[in-house]
Image (cartoon, rainbow, N blue to C red):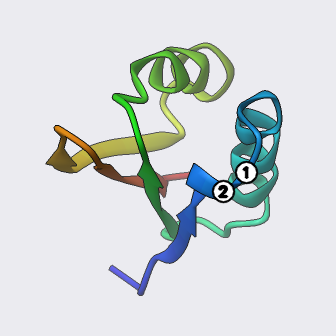
Amino acid sequence: MADAISIDVREIPPRNRHAFIFQAFQALGAGGSLLLVVDHDPKPLQYQFDAEYKGAFSWQYLQQGPDQWKVRIGRTK
């Protein structure tokens, strides 16, 4: 797997985070990935990815709290 683009969204206002993440994901080619760093479990984001990109992404927790979560989001298609 190619190196992931790292995005630490803790400094982005919460209301802008999902749009920023989806824009970055859409710019990825197949096989690309994002390494997302957040301050809470991004489960709602995973549900949104499942609704909008079902079958076109992978989701792997690399760290799960308590103060920081890291998730690799891959583009499979």
Residue that mark 1 sits on:
12
Between the C-alphas of marks 1 and 2, the distance is: 4 Å
Residue that mark 2 sits on:
11
Q: Residue at x 82, y 51 (%)?
A: 23
SS for dot 1: loop
Q: Are there few (<14), some (14-19), or many (20+) residues within 10 Å of tag 2? A: few
Q: Residue at x 17, y 38 (%)?
A: 66
Residue 38, horizontal then vertical, whole percent: 45, 47
Residue 68: image tag: none
Q: Quadrant of residue 59?
A: top left
Number of numbered discs overlaid on the protein picture: 2
Q: Residue at x 82, y 37 (%)?
A: 16
Q: Residue at x 42, y 86 (%)?
A: 3
Classify 23 as above or below 45: below
Classify 7 as above or below 46: below
Nearest to the observer: residue 68 or residue 1? 68
SS for dot 2: helix
Residue 61, horizontal then vertical, whole percent: 22, 45
Q: Give yes or no for contact between labels 1 and 2 (Cβ–Cβ under 8 Å).
A: yes
Residue 1, horizontal then vertical, whole percent: 32, 79
Q: Is residue 61 left or right of residue 57?
A: left
Outermost residue on the bottom side: it is 3
Q: Is residue 17 left or right of residue 75?
A: right
Q: Amino acid at mark 1?
A: Ile
Nearest to the observer: residue 17 or residue 56? 17
Residue 74, horizontal then vertical, whole percent: 45, 56
Q: Quadrant of residue 18?
A: top right
Classify 62 as above or below 55: below
Q: Amino acid at mark 2?
A: Glu
